[in-house]
Image (spheres, rainbow, N blue to C red):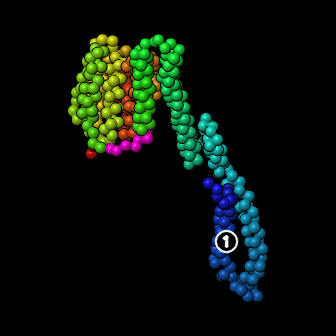
């Protein structure tokens, strides 16, 4: 925004220093006059005929006072300019860093040295903001690149299938239609997942009373056939866990957690336990599943977009599009909650969601 030019902060501080010095000098002269010169007799003899009178003292003191005041003004201008420059030097570094950030360079850091003061706290806060902004921008770039790649894959497959069908008219159309249907379904699922993730990040939804225990039962009922096909025992326990939020988003959160627990499980004899409870002013949802052991350094990356399972690759048709836990994390964050992922010593994962309860 265009602004009219004005005095710099350094010049304003300098003038403030000069003003304070001039005021202090004037007060000192006033004190001398009030408490000293006014009591000196103003006559030709002076005090007892041997001391100078007021006229001589004033005319002798006035030039010296004027010189002192002039020196104070000059000293205030020079000293104030130097002191203001030293005091405002940290702001110059912060300004330069802000300009570099505005030009797209988010890797620059101020890293101001010295003891903690207002400027040091400001520079530390600015460095922290730049670090978070750089991380967010990098995450968004990775997400955009991955989303473009994921969306391009089904389109490329569809084009290949159509090219093959065009060059070979005798090819079975039923098989072609079936394969195109599968590819198209996956593209639609990916697009809906991206839209849902964006909706959760924006946090734009209507809040209403929701019971996580009912959502857990609904998700378990929906995914029970999948669990039976994979030989996984699915169990829902616990009591009511009420919170305020979007029933649609929270149902998708619970469904994603349960589906993830069923898919990433043991080949046979696996278990999934869903438990809901209220812990004071917090509603808690826990989803625990058996499965392969997970490395501790892998667990924090599972909520990143397009991460699929322990090996981060698609293992079968149920592995999804790699946005399951990313959507869960987005929904939990939009509802002012917390998401904790803890690897089980025996293998598998324990996911704990904590949301604000209903007052």
At x 77% / y 76%, what residue is drawn? 60
Residue behind mark 1? 26
Tell me the quarter of the picture where residue 211 sits: top left
- In the picture, the quarter occupied by the C terminus is top left
Residue in front for this viewpoint, 343 or 328: 328
Q: Does 190 sit left or right of 28 as displayed?
A: left
At x 35% / y 36%, what residue is drawn? 249
Residue 347 percent location from the top left of the image: 35, 16
Reply above or below: 193 against 46.
above
Residue 297 percent location from the top left of the image: 46, 21
* Residue 237 visible in the shown view: yes
Q: Main secondary structure of the magenta part?
A: loop
Q: Is residue 326 magenta?
A: no
Tell me the quarter of the picture where residue 334 sits: top left
Residue 147 percent location from the top left of the image: 50, 28
Kindly state the secondary structure of the residue where label 1 is placed.
helix
Residue 4 percent location from the top left of the image: 66, 60
* Residue 296 visible in the shown view: no
Reply above or below: 355 against 256.
below
- In the picture, the quarter occupied by the N terminus is bottom right
| Residues shaded magenta | 201-207
Reply above or below: 259 against 194.
above
């Amino acid at each position: 925004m265009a602004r009219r030019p004005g005095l710099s902060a350094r010049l304003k501080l300098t003038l403030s220093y000069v003003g304070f010095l001039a005021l202090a000098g004037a007060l000192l002269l006033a004190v001398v006059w009030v408490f000293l010169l006014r009591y000196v007799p103003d006559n030709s003899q002076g005090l007892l005929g041997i001391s100078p009178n007021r006229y001589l003292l004033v005319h002798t003191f006035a030039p010296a006072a004027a010189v002192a005041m002039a020196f104070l003004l000059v000293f205030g201008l020079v000293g104030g300019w130097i002191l203001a420059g030293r005091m405002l030097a940290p702001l110059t570094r912060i300004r330069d860093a802000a300009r570099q950030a505005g030009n797209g360079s988010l890797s620059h850091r101020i890293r101001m040295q010295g003891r903690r003061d207002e400027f040091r706290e400001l520079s530390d806060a600015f460095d922290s903001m730049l670090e978070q902004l750089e991380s967010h921008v990098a995450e968004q770039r990775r997400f955009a690149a991955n989303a473009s790649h994921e969306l391009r894959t089904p389109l490329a497959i569809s084009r290949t299938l159509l090219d093959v069908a065009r060059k070979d008219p005798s090819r079975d159309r039923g098989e072609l239609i079936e394969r195109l249907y599968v590819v198209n379904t996956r593209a639609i699922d990916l697009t809906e997942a991206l839209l849902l993730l964006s909706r959760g990040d924006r946090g734009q939804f209507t809040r209403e009373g929701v019971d996580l225990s009912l959502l857990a039962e609904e998700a378990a009922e929906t995914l029970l056939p999948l669990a039976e096909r994979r030989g996984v025992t699915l169990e829902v326990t616990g009591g009511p866990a009420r919170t305020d939020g979007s029933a649609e988003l929270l149902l998708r959160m619970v469904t994603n957690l349960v589906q993830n627990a069923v898919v990433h499980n043991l080949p046979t004899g696996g278990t999934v336990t869903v438990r809901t409870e209220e812990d004071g002013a917090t509603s808690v949802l826990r989803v625990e599943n058996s499965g392969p052991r997970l490395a501790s350094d892998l667990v924090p990356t599972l909520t990143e977009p397009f991460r699929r399972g322990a090996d981060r690759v698609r293992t079968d048709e149920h592995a999804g599009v790699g946005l399951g836990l990313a959507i869960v994390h987005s929904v939990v964050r939009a509802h002012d909650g917390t998401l904790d992922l803890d690897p089980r010593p025996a293998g598998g994962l324990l996911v704990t969601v904590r949301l604000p309860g209903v007052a």
